[in-house]
Image (cartoon, rainbow, N blue to C red):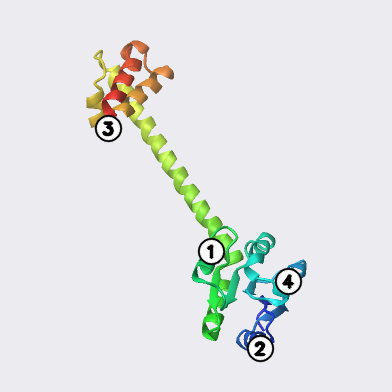
Amino acid sequence: MNDSRVLIIEDDDFQYEIYEEALGKYQLVRSTTASEALKALAGTPPNVIILDHILAKGELGLEYLAEFKELLPHVPIIVVSGALEVHQQIDALQGPRRAHYCITKPVDLHELTRTVETALAECGETEVVRQFEALERSRRVDVQELLSRSTDRLSRQTQIRQMLAATDERPNISALARRFKVARRTIIRDLQELIRRGELPPEVYPRWQSDAEDEAGEEE
């Protein structure tokens, strides 16, 4: 028997027998109401939840969906019902407290077993790990891009400083922009930073502040 636990919230005995036949290799736990299932979750949590919509005592499964996701946010939930409108199915599959899958009744056993296998393989802890890995990759890309841009800027500023040290002429913003293939305002910011850091004397480009305003106006 597979160690995975499947919580089946279903009040119809015949329907539950169908689940037993199709999912017999898993450890099955049954509740006939959603409120009963919520109380049972204090024990060992399931790996998958199969949630019927029309339940005993007049309960509606979808009305408890948020509570299940609050207690077990990463456990995949498969909603099963023949009474849901299309818009209700779409709503159940959207938002932060959503179901992972919706299956209509009468249940196709092949679809059911395939969906449970997919949920066990790709959702739950596996999904959380995959999300963290994607986040880490995204952060690494962002950091690498930031470092690359910073390195390019420092290299460009070093070259500008060396070029200006060899001449007494006022910097030609447009010529520098073409040389380094950047916007003119980028060159002006480079000059501003060099002057602020004391790597260029203010008299090299004494009008950088007013010129910066003129350049910004030209490019708008």
**What is the spatial separation of the Cα atoms under label 4 and label 3, in whole angstroms?**
66 Å
Residue depicted at x 61% and y 64% = 125
Comes first in the chain, label 1 or label 4: 4
Mark 1 vs mark 4: give the one in front.
1
Question: Is disc 3 surrounded by few (<14), some (14 to 19) or many (20+) residues within 10 Å?
Answer: some
Q: Which quadrant of the view contains residue 119? A: bottom right
Q: Which amino acid does label 2 sit on?
A: Phe
Q: Is residue 153 left or right of residue 91?
A: left
Q: Which amino acid does label 1 sit on?
A: Asp
> For this rendering, which residue is in front, 7 or 118?
7
Q: Which amino acid does label 3 sit on?
A: Phe
Read off the residue under disc 2: 14
Q: Are marks 4 and 3 in contact (CB under 8 Å)?
A: no
**What is the spatial separation of the Cα atoms under label 4 and label 2, in whole angstroms?**
19 Å
Q: Are marks 1 and 3 in contact (CB under 8 Å)?
A: no
Image coordinates of residue 195 in percent, x first then y, are: 39, 17
Q: Are marks 3 and 2 in contact (CB under 8 Å)?
A: no
Comes first in the chain, label 3 or label 2: 2
Q: Is mark 1 on a helix, strand or loop?
A: helix
Q: What residue type is labelled 4?
A: Ala
Read off the residue under disc 1: 91
Read off the residue under disc 4: 37
Residue depicted at x 60% and y 60% = 97
Q: What element carries label 2?
A: helix
Residue depicted at x 56% and y 56% = 132
Image coordinates of residue 107 in percent, x first then y, are: 55, 83
